[in-house]
Amino acid sequence: MLKATLGALMLLLASSVLGAQDVRPTCNKCPATYIPNQEIQAYAKRAIADKLIDQQIRAVDAGKTNVDVGLVYRGKLAAPAPNSVAEHDQVSEVYHVIDGSATLVTGPDLVDTKRRPADDRAVKMLNGPGSNSASIRNGVTHQLKPGDVVIIPAGTGHWFTKIDDHITYLMVRIDPDKVTPHKDEAASKAYLAGGGK
């Protein structure tokens, strides 16, 4: 009996070790996605000309998660608008500041939270379900400038309280629940050719 149990344990251990060595990519044979600077600049120009804030450039399936890249342009802001704290339930965001400067407050303790409607453009196209709030209790203040990076996990509020003249940043969204629609290069070109509508 002891020999049979030891044999079974050895077999189980051997299969675990062999299984651990059989690591496979989480995105099997997925292609890389390239976005040229010229395309990013076209989105920036469109944002300024048409007073657009957040535009999705690409949204791709990367295996266990979607990864989205957008361009955000925000103009001068002396004081925050009412209920302008944003929070996304399932999508984390990474900002890489390209140009301009601003004050960003982040934190998870939101005050006077209201759910965004399911038909809201941002919910459907950019960052999935979430809320807006009046403010952030005990928030952390970040003075953003070109080259800075901020990582905002899903569920963390974020709030621009001041923008000196403007801020332009590349937005990378990590969407493990795949709540955002895909957007490929052809869709991006069609968007830009169609006047950004």
Image (tube, helix red, strand yellow):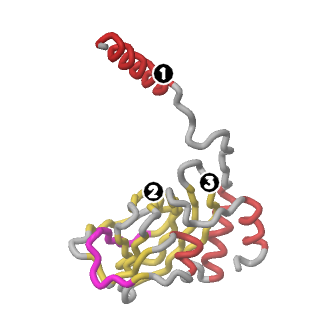
Q: Amino acid at mark 3?
A: Asp
Q: From this view, report whether residue 5 is shown above or below residue 75.
A: above
Image point 60% across, 71% down: which residue?
Answer: 55
Residue 177 falls left or right of residue 133: right
**Number of marks in picture:** 3
**Which residue is label 1 attached to?**
18
The residue nearer to you, when weighing 105 against 186, is: 186
| Quadrant position of the N terminus in the picture | top left
Label placed on residue 61:
3
Q: Earlier in the sequence, mark 1 or mark 2?
A: 1
Q: Amino acid at mark 1?
A: Leu
| 105 in magenta | yes
The residue nearer to you, when weighing 82 against 50, is: 82
Highlighted range, magenta: 101-114
Image point 61% across, 76% down: which residue?
Answer: 47
Q: Residues within 10 Å of mark 2 (few under 14, many from 20)?
A: few
**Which residue is label 2 attached to?**
147
Image point 39% across, 18% down: which residue?
Answer: 8
Question: Which SS class for mark 2?
Answer: loop
Question: Which SS class for mark 1?
Answer: helix
Q: Earlier in the sequence, mark 3 or mark 2?
A: 3
Residue 21 percent across, percent down from the top left: 49, 24
